[in-house]
Image: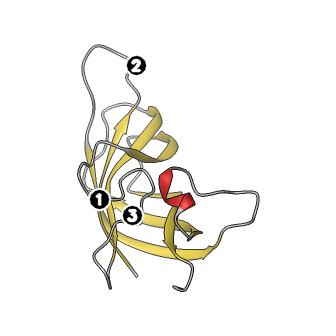
Amino acid sequence: SLMTTMTLAPQPANAVGPTKINLLNPTYTAVPCPKDKPIPGEKAMKGMKGLCVTVNVDLEGAPEKELEKVGVYGFVTDKGTGESVLANNPDLSTDAGQFAMIESVKPSDKKLQFEFIAAVPREMD
């Protein structure tokens, strides 16, 4: 199972600055990725397999206006090992790497769903 710390940040579209919305109470559903969906990043070369993870979250707050092309940033770790499952942040050194994209977030949204690819050892389920 996975543990996470995540925030949303839309792509810069104005000079006001980024909007940060914390994502709470994540629940995960993971299935093996199809062969045509490779793991992004460097872990793909180290005997890892990709899990396509669907995440459902509650929003801590709502944006003042609709946000488009919203990036998801943060940490996602394996609960058993404490290791990162994000190919673009294998050593947990930063949460600056975007690992998912959400098409839009509306002021009325209370919950969101998005998908990312987790890199896990081949022997793990």
In the depicted structure, whether residue 105 falls above or below residue 78: above
Which of the image's four quarters has the N terminus? bottom left
Q: Quickly name the residue at label 3.
A: 57
Q: Residue at x 57, y 79 (%)?
A: 122
**Pointer 2 residue:** 13
Q: Residues within 10 Å of mark 2 (few under 14, many from 20)?
A: few
Q: Measuring from the top left, give residue 19's x and y in whole percent.
A: 27, 34
Measure the C-alpha gap from mark 3 to mark 1: 24 Å
Looking at the image, is 4 positioned above or below residue 89?
Answer: below
Question: What is the x, y in percent for residue 71?
Answer: 42, 41
The three-letter amino acid code for the residue at tag 2 is: Ala
Please state which amino acid type lies under the numbered disc 3: Val
Q: Closer to the N terminus: mark 2 or mark 3?
A: 2
Secondary structure beneath dot 1 equals loop
Label number found at residue 91: 1
Determine which of the numbered discs, if any, sits on residue 4 in the image: none
- Colouring style: secondary structure
Q: Is residue 79 above or below residue 69?
A: below
* Cα separation between marks 2 and 1: 31 Å
